[in-house]
Image: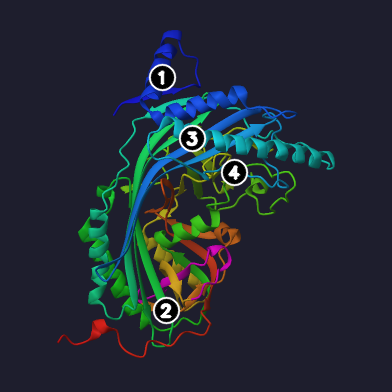
């Protein structure tokens, strides 16, 4: 695949720079969208000026040229289809200077473009420029007023050691080949129908469904600093869910997902069908399992639920950036914990967007450049349990001024965001048998009859409550583990709270990580974590009023005529 790549962080020889510029100009001539963005950017740079106000010191456009397709199915029949095509344009217009501009103001009322203008999907140069012109004019008029309000606000406050509003970065030039964004919905539909049909064999499953989605797009980023960035990609994702109801009315729901950048990267169909059957069988066994009244003590979270709890507890905490003028500081901000121990000494955490695959699973958190055009970097966040640094966008903070390529939230990202967050244990990693033995030894120290092992999280009880920092995820596949080695499946418990203190007292970690992906359109994140043995967590009985089970059995249970 052809690429023109010139990352302007080094001094290039004159001939090499000239060749790169020639290649870029050729790309601009061939690509109508890129040409319209660059031409209107240059016109705005030279002519955008409101009498009595400053001209922009930075203008940045981001355009997503994408298509999408979605199919849902239930019991082997299609229940929904959605397919579309669009071009979404956003802008980041800044007046003032890198030191002080219209951003980072909590008292403002204008938030800028941020992907809220639709652009013609046809390659009509003038029509595309018209949309860019209109949005730029609107945003400029909004931000000049916001800067005036910000300056007036700051004059009435005592503000010390405020960081600059934007960290200057050298321009990046990188043009990947464009892709055809057309999507074929037929294989998506075929897979969704096949997976959902599995549940026809399980009348005890009250509700179920499968969905498969796909996105394809060419992404553009250009600014007055000289960045000219074009990337392209596809993402495919599937989700399967199922719910059963126990005789006492308690509903128990499970689900699983899978992702890939190609349809062929999704797990093989036979594997997915087997997983659907296993999920149904586990749910049916679970609805007849005894209730767990309560429990306080050591709990072993297998790698899959551990990755989910870690993502919910830490995923949004590693982002750095300054507090907006006029807003209050968050006492839980990780900037206050730099240099302090937040995890056990044998755990390390890094964010590494470079790998396209981790442990044989596509890493959807992979990216080469962040949403501000900064090359992605590997960041060591936690070493020996201590928080060392944060994920940074171009929005400086008192603790860290430079971007490390993690500005992924928006065009004017105020905080850094996760790419691929990877949790590893030092030499303390244990295999499954040793982890269970550690669990039982910890229970013996507490004179407990049994320990608890949680193999999966899901929805228990049918309520919409959120439980502490666990994000509302309840234990689904929960087992009592006895000293003689046997296990007993139980149901009906919820985690009271999983917080930072609980993570500081993790006793051991497993040696096999689970790769958890989350995708939204063409964006994705990955969290990789091993099994974790917590010294103490609280489980409480799910205590609420449940709906009565259906009066009649499901039609799937009828005798064939």
Quadrant of the image containing the N terminus: top left
Query: What stretch of residues is rendered in magenta?
Result: 463-487
Q: Is residue 85 above or below residue 72?
A: above
Q: Residue furthest bottom?
A: 551
290 on left or right of 182: right
Residue at 55% in and 64% down:
498
Instruction: Say which residue label 2 marks.
Output: 251
Q: Position of residue 2 (x, y in %)?
A: 31, 26
In the rendered image, is residue 48 in sight?
A: yes
N-terminal of the pair, mark 1 or mark 3, is 1
The number of numbered badges drawn on the structure is 4
Residue 296 figure quarter: bottom right
Q: CA distance from mark 2 to mark 3?
A: 44 Å
In the rendered image, is residue 357 in sight?
A: no
Which element type, helix, strand or loop, lies under badge 2? Answer: strand
Which element type, helix, strand or loop, lies under badge 4? Answer: loop
Instruction: Say which residue label 4 marks.
Output: 415
Instruction: Say which residue label 3 marks.
Output: 377
Q: Position of residue 240 (x, y in %)?
A: 33, 64
Looking at the picture, tell me which residue is in the foreground, 228 or 539. Answer: 228
N-terminal of the pair, mark 4 or mark 1, is 1
Number of other residues with Cα within 10 Å of mark 3, as a class: few under 14, some 14 to 19, many 20 or more: many
Q: Position of residue 154 (x, y in %)?
A: 80, 40
Q: CA distance from mark 4 to mark 1?
A: 33 Å
């Amino acid at each position: 695949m052809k690429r023109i790549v010139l990352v302007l962080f080094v001094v290039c020889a004159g001939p090499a720079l000239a060749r790169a510029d020639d290649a870029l100009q050729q790309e601009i001539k061939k690509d109508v969208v890129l040409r319209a963005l660059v031409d209107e950017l240059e016109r705005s740079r030279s002519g955008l000026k409101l009498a009595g106000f400053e001209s922009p010191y930075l203008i940045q456009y981001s355009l997503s040229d994408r298509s999408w397709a979605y199919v849902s199915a239930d019991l082997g029949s299609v229940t929904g289809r959605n397919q579309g095509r669009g071009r979404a344009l956003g802008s980041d217009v800044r007046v003032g200077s890198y030191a002080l501009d219209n951003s980072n103001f909590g008292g403002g009322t204008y938030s800028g473009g941020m992907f809220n203008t639709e652009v013609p999907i046809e390659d009509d140069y003038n029509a595309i420029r018209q949309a860019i012109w209109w949005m730029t004019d609107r945003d400029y008029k909004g931000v000049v007023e916001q800067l005036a309000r910000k300056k007036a606000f700051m004059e009435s406050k005592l503000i010390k050691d405020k960081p600059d509003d934007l960290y200057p970065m050298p321009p990046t030039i990188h043009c990947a080949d464009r892709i055809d964004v057309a999507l074929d919905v037929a294989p998506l539909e075929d897979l969704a129908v096949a997976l959902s049909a599995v549940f026809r064999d399980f009348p005890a499953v009250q509700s179920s469904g499968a969905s498969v989605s796909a996105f394809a797009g060419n992404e553009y980023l250009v600014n007055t600093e000289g960045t000219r960035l074009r990337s392209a990609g596809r993402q495919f994702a599937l989700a399967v869910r199922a719910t059963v109801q126990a005789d006492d009315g308690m509903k128990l729901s499970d689900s699983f997902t899978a992702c890939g950048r190609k349809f062929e990267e999704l797990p093989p169909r036979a594997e997915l069908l087997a997983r659907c059957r296993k999920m149904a069988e586990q749910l049916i066994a679970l609805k007849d399992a005894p209730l767990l009244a309560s429990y306080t003590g050591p709990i072993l979270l297998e790698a899959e639920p551990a990755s989910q709890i870690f993502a919910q507890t830490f995923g949004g905490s590693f982002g750095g950036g300054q507090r907006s003028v006029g807003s209050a500081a968050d006492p839980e901000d990780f900037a206050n914990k730099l240099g302090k121990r937040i995890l056990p000494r044998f755990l390390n955490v890094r964010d590494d967007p470079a790998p396209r695959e981790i442990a044989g699973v596509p890493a959807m958190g992979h990216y080469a450049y962040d949403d501000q055009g900064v090359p992605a970097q590997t960041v060591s966040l936690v070493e020996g349990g201590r928080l060392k640094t944060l994920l940074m966008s171009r929005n400086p903070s008192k603790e860290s001024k430079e971007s490390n390529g993690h500005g992924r939230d928006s065009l004017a990202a105020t905080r850094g965001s996760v790419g691929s967050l990877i949790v590893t244990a030092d030499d303390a990693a244990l295999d499954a048998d040793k982890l269970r033995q550690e669990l039982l030894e910890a229970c013996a120290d507490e004179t407990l009859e049994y320990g608890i092992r949680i193999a999966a999280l899901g929805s228990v009880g049918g309520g919409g409550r959120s439980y502490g920092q666990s994000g509302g995820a309840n234990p689904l596949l929960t087992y009592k583990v006895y000293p003689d080695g046997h296990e007993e499946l139980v149901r009906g418990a919820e985690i009271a709270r999983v917080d930072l203190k609980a993570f500081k007292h993790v006793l051991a970690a497993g040696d096999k990580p689970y790769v958890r992906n989350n995708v939204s359109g063409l964006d994705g994140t990955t969290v990789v974590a091993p099994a974790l043995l917590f010294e103490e967590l609280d489980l409480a009985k799910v205590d609420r009023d449940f709906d009565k089970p259906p009066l009649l059995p499901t039609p799937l249970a009828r005798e064939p005529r």
